[in-house]
Image (tube, rainbow, N blue to C red):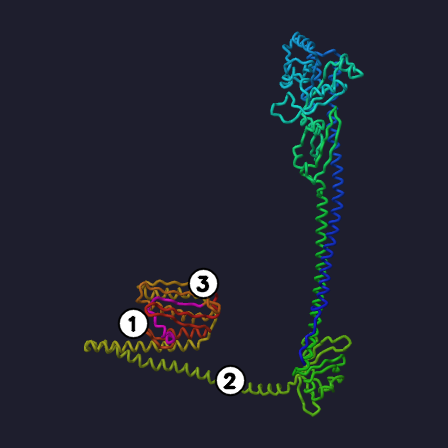
Amino acid sequence: MGNETRPTPEAGAEPLQSRRGYQLAWLVLVGSLLMVFLYAQAAGERERQLAGADFVAEAGQIVDLMRQRLLAYELTVHGGASLFGSLTRPGARQWQSYVDGLRIERRSFALTGLGYAAWLTPKELEDLQMELRAAGRGLYRIDPHGARQRYGPIVYLEPGTPGNLAAIGYDMYSEPVRRAAMDAARDSGSPQLTGGVRLLQQDEEATEPGLLLYTPVYRAGSFPANVLARRGSMQGWVYTPFEVREFVESSLAPIQRSAVFRIVDLADDSELYVDSGYAEVADSPHRFRHSIERELYGRKWRIDFRSAPDSAAGAASPALRATLVAGVLASLLLFAVVWTLARTHSHAQRLAARMSESYRRSELRFRSAMEYSAIGKALLDRDDRVVEANPALARILGVAPAELPGTAFGSRLLAADAGRERHDGDGVVRATRELRRPDGDLRHVQLTYAPVPGDIGSGVTRLVQVEDVSERLRAEAQVHALNRTLELRVAARTRELRQANQELESFAYSVSHDLRAPLRTIDGFGRMLAERFGNALDDSGHDYLRRIRAATARMDGLIDALLKMSRLSRAELKRVPVDLSRMAEEIVAELRQADPGREVEVVVAPGLQAEGDAALLRNLLENLLGNAWKFTAGATPARLEFGADPHAEGGQRFFVRDNGAGFAQEYADKLFRPFQRLHGQEEFPGHGIGLASVKRIVDRHGGEVHGEGRPGQGACFRFTLPGAVA
């Protein structure tokens, strides 16, 4: 059967549906943002209209306040004119008292003063000068000097500030702008404003213009009916000067304004007043604009308004900005929700496709496992009838595969033995049964029942696996018989080994006793010979006796060493925690006590711990430290060290290092053999079994030991002990 590649949903319709979900998410985002934008546009337009209406209302309020302030100025000058109507001409003190009563400087009127200018011919000017001199006011000078047909000099000006006092005598009728307003007031009989002028009270460098408001004073307080009559009965003018900037600021002091403006006198197209922020926004298209024209006391003003620099026309209010931000966030949130749903839907589709494909492959694997398994398998229904079986089961039962479906599986088995069934939980049952094949052959089979879910409507409830264990049971019987034979042989070998060890121990003690008896005899007769017949012997004889006794002592030491090695192999190993650092320090102290004349630097690393037989480990350290002490006898200074370093396989590797005689590395393996020595007895005495004992102790603990050295440069012996604490 060839391999067939089936198309999966991921390759076709499923990505298309996923893309549609993502496209819907983008569509929702664009639509919601568009709705937010349209709402913002409409709300912004409404806010712009409301802001524009507020701006126009504020502009009207500003104009009204300035008009009210001018009305107050008008009432002030009318009051002064009324004083002249009650008196032919008030005196200086009367005028001063009247102005003081007005309290101009305290009422924040922004007025420089209140004055009176007379309308005089040259003859009337001379009479006025004589009258004022007679009243004690001194010489009354006219400025500017010169002969003119008519004069309009300032006679009174209060309050008496230095600037006002300096202005008395100035002929305002000689200046064209003032004269035009004075003539208009005379002829009209109503108050009139001048254009922008520099007030006499201002400095020469002053750039802010000032204004004067004139009201006519007619003789006897009359009000002539026509221009000629007014000119004929003209007496003078009551006027008030004021600076335009102070006038504006005092007029608008009661309100908080956001608009900036300028005042233009259309008669001469001059700017009377400009707000500090007006120039920045004068031509800006993003500001509100509004202009108001007013006829004020003979002058035509245009007030041009602009929204302030810190508030753009139609700029979004905080509430609108918050609404816009909330709308954008809601759009993004909605987009995220739809996107997440699309992803979830796409993931669910991919997961369903993978599960379908996984199910299909699982079904194929199950079918392949059923078809080609060497173990018999069958699917059973609720009545334990075979729904489906594999060829292996047919071979085990000795029937054709087509005969199995629909038959009762238990009918082919012999009587059950309840004791041979085992329940493992989760519905799994294991049992060993016997069956008889149609040809009469009796087979043993291992049955495993496990619940399995079948397809809907199939009726499958569990799976049974049938394994023919006849050959295995026969093999197990043979193995059991062989094991019993081996156990008997091991027991016999153990008895023989125990007996051999006992004989070896008896032999060791017997050899020790039998060898030591002649050695003691030789040593005793040698000592008696030296004591009794020493005088009869020459130097050679004494040397022979000394050699005999030394050989006897050395042989006795070898016998002791053999016994010790024998005990090392036979002693029972008792593992306990051992403090190797403390044990090493005790051994070094014993070495120093035994050889107090030597100066040896000894370094013992603290905290070295191991687990093992304490007596054997002490023997191990005694041999290694004793060798290091012995072989550093010719080193100056002598130094030996006991420490540990990390082992590549974990744990610790201990070492004993010295700077003594050392050895050639090629002889390292021979060091651990009994009675192998690399130095002469006269140079370094010993029996040659110390390192052999070390190796046996390390081997019994399951560790390793090896040595490193160089002649004349010392030696280092490293060993491991399983269970060493790192």
Residue 68, image x, y percentages: 75, 26
Q: Is residue 665 magenta?
A: yes
Disc 1 is placed on an element classified as loop
Residue 534, image x, y percentages: 21, 76
Residue 199, image x, y percentages: 65, 22
Quick one: which residue is furthest to the top in this view?
A: 134
- The magenta region covers 653-671
Query: Is any part of residue 570 visible from this angle?
Result: yes
**Residue 683 numbered tag:** 1
Which three-letter amino acid code belongs to the residue tagged 2? Val
| Residue that mark 2 sits on | 490
Quick one: which residue is furthest to the bottom in this view?
A: 439
* Callout 1 crowding tier (Cα within 10 Å): few <14, some 14–19, many ≥20: few
Which three-letter amino acid code belongs to the residue tagged 1? Glu
Between the residue at mark 3 and the residue at mark 1, the CA separation in whole angstroms equals 35 Å
**Residue 535 numbered tag:** none
Between the residue at mark 2 and the residue at mark 3, the CA separation in whole angstroms equals 45 Å
Q: Quadrant of the N terminus?
A: bottom right
Query: Is any part of residue 158 visible from this angle?
Result: no
Above or below — where is 244 with respect to 635?
Answer: above
Residue in the picture at 75% in, 78% down: 460
Between the residue at mark 2 and the residue at mark 1, the CA separation in whole angstroms equals 50 Å
Residue in the picture at 74% in, 11% down: 88
| Residue that mark 3 sits on | 607
Quick one: which residue is furthest to the right in this view?
A: 225
Observer-side mark, 2 or 3, equals 3
Q: Is residue 400 magenta?
A: no
